[in-house]
Image (cartoon, rainbow, N blue to C red):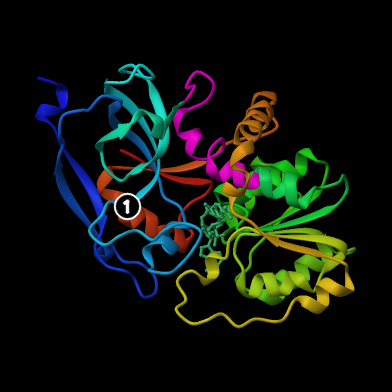
Amino acid sequence: MTLNDFLKSKAYVLKSRPAGKPTPDDFEEIEVALPALEDGQILLEAKYISVDPYMRGRMSDQKSYVAPFEIGQPITGGVVARVMESRSSMFHPGDMVMGMLKWEDIQIAWATEVQKIDVELAPASYYLGLFGLTGLTAYFGMMRIAKPKPAETVVISGAAGAVGMVVGQIAKIMGCNVIGIAGSPSKQRFLTEELGFDYAFDYHDLQTLEENLHRAAPLGVDIYFDNVGGEVSDLILNYITHGARIVICGQIALYNDPKKAVGPYPQIALIKNSALMKGFIVSDYADSFHEGQLELIKWYKEGVLKGHETVIQGFDKLPETFISLFDGKNTGKMLIQV
Ligand SMILES: NC(=O)c1ccc[n+]([C@@H]2O[C@H](COP(=O)([O-])OP(=O)(O)OC[C@H]3O[C@@H](n4cnc5c(N)ncnc54)[C@H](OP(=O)(O)O)[C@@H]3O)[C@@H](O)[C@H]2O)c1
């Protein structure tokens, strides 16, 4: 008789594909009876579950870099979990691990699906944010594409979110003039007072944003790290300098818009400035994740890189917490503590 002979778990599955912004009705909570462990499997208790804007794309039935979620099947994403029982020599009960797992409070995984994390070094949840995919996205977008040089001006949209807050801190480490764009006064204070950004501006009034940019970046924008897209990005394109790098990381302003986006045509600005505009997916750099993690951990230990999270309690809050990303409810990494 093993532990999971007695166990049932709760899971969230995709119930329907949203047309615009997702609603809680697009998700369904189900009960799952757990079978006995097979050799090579481990039983996991989820501690933290990540909610991320890219998951919106997986809710649609569209070809993308990652397969859509299937109707009736569990949502998957980043999870930090504790090993409850192991039939693998790789893990022991009590070990803390992370992996791309199901939105399920107790689950069975193959030992090869997860990696052990060092919770002596940093809080376990940081492996979903600062040292996880969002931190690595910031790291590779900056260090492999933007390649910042001291005294350059860096503008970041979605700056107070999980990726943006790390981008700006890396830009400061590299000696840049850093301007963050974020949607509330408290987020703007967080960026300047806690993270050391040089400026932080709101984006809801584009004219005010333009005036502020003019003042803070009189010589123009050398690097634009785009998490948001839409009109904010259109505006910033008017300010790029010769040799500018525009890193296309995300377009959250467009994710819930069912219409095909029509924007200005950036090609002339790119030609005139010999500028680079490059999209990327963090997994492009999967072979170098270890290197990126070591560098982020080094900066964290030196005290020049900080983590910040918005943690919501309760497995049952997963759908609404995910949806609230689109209302800007998070500062830093948004997580569920199970
Ligand atoms: N390329 C990759 O491999 C990769 C990897 C991870 C993430 N991403 C992308 O990077 C971006 C940031 O991801 P994240 O995980 O760090 O999320 P996040 O920034 O922590 O959370 C989303 C934030 O986006 C802002 N936002 C929401 N709707 C918006 C709108 N219509 N217009 C402008 N801002 C809006 C909100 O902040 P405000 O209060 O400031 O509006 C919200 O807090 C997303 O676009 C995501 O898809 C890409």
x 55%, y 45%: residue: 134
x 63%, y 28%: residue: 297
Left or right of 152 in this view: 45: left
Q: Residue furthest front?
A: 39
Amino acid identity at mark 1: Ile
* Residue 84: % across, % down: 26, 23
Left or right of 206 in this view: 52: left
Q: Which residue is mark 1?
A: 75
x 56%, y 80%: residue: 261
Give the extent of the magenta segment: 117-138
Residue 192 visible in image: no
* Residue 64: % across, % down: 49, 63
x 70%, y 32%: residue: 304
Query: Quadrant location of ligand 1?
Result: bottom right
So how many labels did they put on this image?
Answer: 1
Q: Label 1, secondary structure: give it.
A: loop
Residue 30 visible in image: yes
Residue 211, placed above or below residue 98:
below
* Residue 306: % across, % down: 62, 35
- The quarter in which the C terminus is drawn is top left
| Circle 1 Cα neighbour tier, 10 Å, few/some/many (<14 / 14–19 / ≥20) | many
25 or 35, nearer to the observer: 35
Residue 87 falls in which quadrant of the image? top left
* Residue 146: % across, % down: 76, 52
Does mark 1's beta carbon lie closer than 8 Å to ligand 1? no
